[in-house]
Amino acid sequence: MGYSLAKLSNTQGMLSATKIWTSSKDEGRSQINDSFRLWGLKKFDLFQVHKLLNWEEHLDTLRERRAAGQIRYIGITTSHGSRHSEMARTMETQDIDFVQFTYNVEDRDAEDRLLPLAADKGIAVIINRPFQRGTLTNRFEGKPLPTWASEYGITSWAQYLLKFVVSHPAVTCAIPATSKVEHMKENMNVLQTRLPDIKDRQRMLDYVQSL
């Protein structure tokens, strides 16, 4: 990432985000130091404790860095729809700025507790696996989009699925994950057109479930 940043002439508006992922508190400190060195940054926008691994000790470390002005936001992550109960308890009791978890048209457990809790606590939400790593886009490939999809500028199933996720009022952003520039452009176009409201989102879900 540091190599890529050095090649860009303008990084305005970009947000630097990375993770700690280790059971050791000391190793966590080392990972933070390594990230600063490898990225070539003096301050990170966001540091997250990945998959809640030893979050208790790592959040203490991140709070120290945040208080020192080296990190702007801190957070926790999980994935694959796992450990939602523990994440909710952490959100309720800890001073954190961001959470990251799985949410898509099929994995909707987050609607019950995590998304409302984030909205209530003012915690930013990053959604991972909006396509289930391609499983969903593959499943709907060849099936027709509804005629009304064009009302929201949707031209592909990837945009349909992603627009459903990012239109949730509690969602801050999604990380679809891709190695292809054309897919990144397709995903970015989702935000260039109108987002569906609550009623429209239900229509989107009903159509998917009818296929």
Image (cartoon, rainbow, N blue to C red):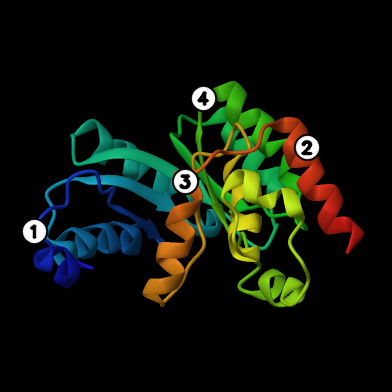
Mark 1 or 3, nearer chain start? 1
At mark 1, the secondary structure is loop
Mark 4 or 1, nearer chain start? 1
In the picture, which quadrant includes the C terminus? bottom right
Residue 21 visible to an observer of this rendering: no
Residue at image mark 2: 112
Query: In front: 191, or 71?
Result: 191
Mark 1 or 2, nearer chain start? 1
Query: In front: 210, or 11?
Result: 210
Q: Relative to residue 35, is residue 79 drawn left or right? A: right
At mark 4, the secondary structure is loop
The location of residue 63, given as percent across then percent down, is: 33, 37
Q: Is residue 51 above or below residue 70?
A: below
Q: What's the residue type where badge 4 is placed?
A: Gly
Query: In front: 112, or 27?
Result: 112
Q: What's the residue type where badge 2 is placed?
A: Asp
Report the Cα–Cα distance between label 4 and label 1.
33 Å
- Dot 3 crowding, Cα within 10 Å, few <14, some 14–19, many 20+: some
Residue 191 — which label? 3
Report the Cα–Cα distance between label 2 and label 3.
25 Å
Tell me the mark number nearer the camera, choosing from 4 and 3: 3
Mark 2 or 4, nearer chain start? 2
Q: Relative to residue 70, is residue 127 drawn left or right? A: right
In the picture, which quadrant includes the N terminus? bottom left
Report the Cα–Cα distance between label 1 and label 2.
43 Å
Residue 9 — which label? 1
Residue 122 — which label? 4
Mark 2 or 3, nearer chain start? 2
Report the Cα–Cα distance between label 2 and label 4.
17 Å
Mark 4 or 3, nearer chain start? 4
The location of residue 206, given as percent across then percent down, is: 86, 49
